[in-house]
Image (cartoon, coloured by chain):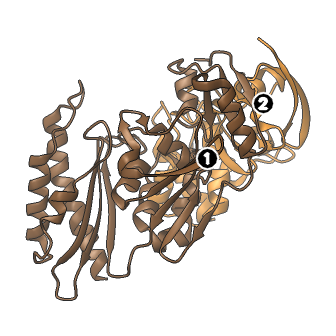
């Protein structure tokens, strides 16, 4: 099948990509850009593990074809810690043991990265509503909620 | 879990998109938010020859106010609809339904035009639009036509849309101040499709009697079902909890839901009963505010 050449802007860096149009953004990020922090869980939009930001808004990378992202800015988990310093949510997750195996964590951090900008003072109910879009199979939700609350009340 | 190969097109104008659809015929699919088409393609339930991505077309993402209606562009995202002050004021049922679609990230991408064209019988927007009496405007090669939502949904994931047509906008009536609207759904987990959903608008008159009611059921059958006659029969009744209970029982008797392995028809009927009463009471309370 024919490939297409295009540029992808990820975390402020340009990547020249040659891929079939059907190649998912998850796979291009991991295989072509070598950014493996974005995890692939269910690959049909349910689990939220592959959540990245597209122009600042959260999106399932497994439901995007990389070729669609020409002209858009993608942010992945690799850009969240700055100069080795964890983001407030990453730090809070660390402190309250908000991750167990860590597989779902990147997607959760990306989701709340955007959500807390839109709503910096959510209630616990609102946090749980947003978190419902990210599955944690260790079922460690309690401490994830606590971590977000810790950021909110900081 | 990877999609089958397809040709990808990203037209910059609606005319180009329509020409591409005309060229590819039924082998092409329109890609809007991709939150339903994407999973279907990843699971290879859908294997279109070509995708016509309409995301780069300007001017399809808006909420506009007219004298008696609001008009929403087909590419308007669920999150924008859920949070639009205009939609929340003029068409609160639609905003309430939009808030309950999938999850936060899904709502950033999914579009109203895509949801209507996909026509999942348990989806929020088809039910809301059918209940509110929305009009759906579709463009085809050389013509634009308007289809009443009541005539748009034909069956499970099947609509009146022709393969070479694209939905461009949806027009909904503005709610008068005397009207209360509500949308409720039941699903096992947050963000799942509804097993049953109910939408209602209730307009009592100055004397506290029912002037106008619209009632719609989603998830129970192969398309959103508007119980217009049942609702009309209650005109003139005293607007109270007894009215809501009677109309809920009438809905329970009238709806013959689908039977699926994990959700027996009788369970859905019970949900129709309970949720109808709940949606009517909520809409009535809001009308009185």
Q: Report which quarter residue B96 is drawn in.
A: bottom left
Q: Is residue B205 left or right of residue B128?
A: left
Q: Which quadrant of the figure contains the C terminus of chain A?
A: bottom right
Q: Is residue A48 left or right of residue B255?
A: right
Which is nearer the eye, B134 or A98?
Answer: B134
Real-space Cα separation, disc 2 to disc 1, in angstroms: 31 Å
Q: Residue at x 17, y 84 (%)?
A: B208
B168, above or below B173, in the image: above
Which numbered mark, 2 or 1, is in the foreground of this view? 1
Residue B255 placement (x, y as % from top left): 16, 44
Of all residues, the one furthest to the bottom in this rendering is B206
Q: Is residue A125 left or right of residue B210?
A: right
Of all residues, the one furthest to the front in this rendering is B142
Q: Residue at x 48, y 37 (%)?
A: B118
Residue A93 is at least partly visible in this image: no
Whether callout 2 and callout 1 share a subunit is answered: no
Q: Which quadrant of the figure contains the N terminus of chain A?
A: top right
Query: Which residue is denoted by mark 2 in the rendering?
Result: A67
Q: Report which quarter residue B132 is drawn in.
A: bottom left
Q: What is the number of the mark on residue B143?
A: 1
Q: Residue at x 87, y 29 (%)?
A: A6
Neighbour tally class for label 1: few under 14, some 14-19, many 20 plus, Cα within 10 Å = few
Q: Residue at x 15, y 58 (%)?
A: B230
* Chain of the residue under label 2: A
In the structure shown, which secondary structural element does the residue marked by tag 1 occupy? Answer: strand
Residue B116 is at least partly visible in this image: yes
Q: What is the number of the mark on residue B230?
A: none
Chain in brown, by letter, is: B
Colour displayed for chain A in the image of the structure = orange
* Chain of the residue under label 1: B
Residue A7 placement (x, y as % from top left): 89, 33
Residue B120 placement (x, y as % from top left): 41, 38
């Amino acid at each position: 099948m024919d490939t297409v050449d295009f540029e992808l802007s990820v975390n402020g860096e340009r990547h020249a990509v040659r891929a079939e149009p059907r190649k998912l953004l998850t796979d291009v990020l991991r295989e072509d850009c070598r950014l493996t922090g974005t995890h692939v869980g269910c690959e049909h939009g349910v689990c939220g593990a592959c959540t990245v930001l597209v122009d600042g808004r959260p999106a399932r990378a497994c439901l995007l074809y990389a070729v669609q992202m020409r002209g858009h800015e993608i942010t992945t988990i690799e850009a969240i810690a700055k100069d080795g310093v964890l983001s407030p949510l990453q730090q809070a997750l660390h402190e309250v043991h908000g991750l167990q195996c860590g597989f779902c964590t990147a997607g959760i951090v990306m989701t709340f990265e955007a959500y807390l900008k839109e709503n910096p003072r959510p209630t616990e109910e609102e946090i749980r509503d947003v978190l419902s879009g990210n599955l944690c199979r260790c079922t460690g939700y309690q401490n994830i909620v606590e971590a977000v609350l810790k950021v909110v009340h900081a | 879990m990877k999609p089958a190969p397809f040709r990808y097109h990203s037209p910059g104008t609606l005319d180009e998109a329509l020409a591409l659809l005309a060229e590819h015929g039924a082998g092409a699919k329109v890609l809007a938010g991709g939150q339903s088409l994407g999973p279907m393609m990843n699971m290879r339930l859908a294997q279109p020859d070509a995708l016509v991505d309409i995301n780069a077309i300007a001017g399809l993402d808006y909420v506009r106010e007219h004298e008696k209606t609001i008009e929403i562009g087909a590419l308007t995202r669920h999150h924008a609809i859920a949070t639009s002050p205009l939609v929340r004021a003029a068409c609160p049922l639609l905003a309430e339904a939009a808030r309950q679609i999938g999850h936060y990230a899904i709502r950033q991408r999914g579009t109203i035009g895509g949801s209507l064209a996909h026509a999942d019988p348990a989806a929020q927007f088809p039910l809301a639009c059918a209940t509110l009496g929305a009009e759906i405007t579709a463009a085809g090669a050389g013509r634009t036509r308007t289809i009443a939502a009541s005539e748009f949904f034909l069956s499970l994931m099947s609509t009146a849309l022709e393969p070479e047509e694209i939905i461009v906008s949806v027009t909904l009536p503005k709610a008068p101040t005397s009207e209360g609207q509500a949308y409720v759904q039941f699903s096992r987990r947050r963000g799942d499709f509804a097993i049953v959903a109910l939408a209602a608008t209730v307009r009592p008159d100055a004397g506290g009697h029912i002037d106008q009611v619209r009632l719609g059921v989603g998830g129970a059958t192969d398309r959103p079902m508007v119980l217009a006659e049942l609702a009309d029969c209650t005109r003139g009744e005293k607007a109270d909890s007894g009215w809501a209970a009677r109309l809920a029982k009438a809905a329970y008797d009238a709806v013959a839901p689908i039977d699926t392995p994990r959700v027996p028809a009788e369970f859905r009927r019970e949900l129709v009963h309970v949720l109808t009463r709940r949606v009517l009471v909520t809409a009535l309370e809001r009308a009185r505010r």
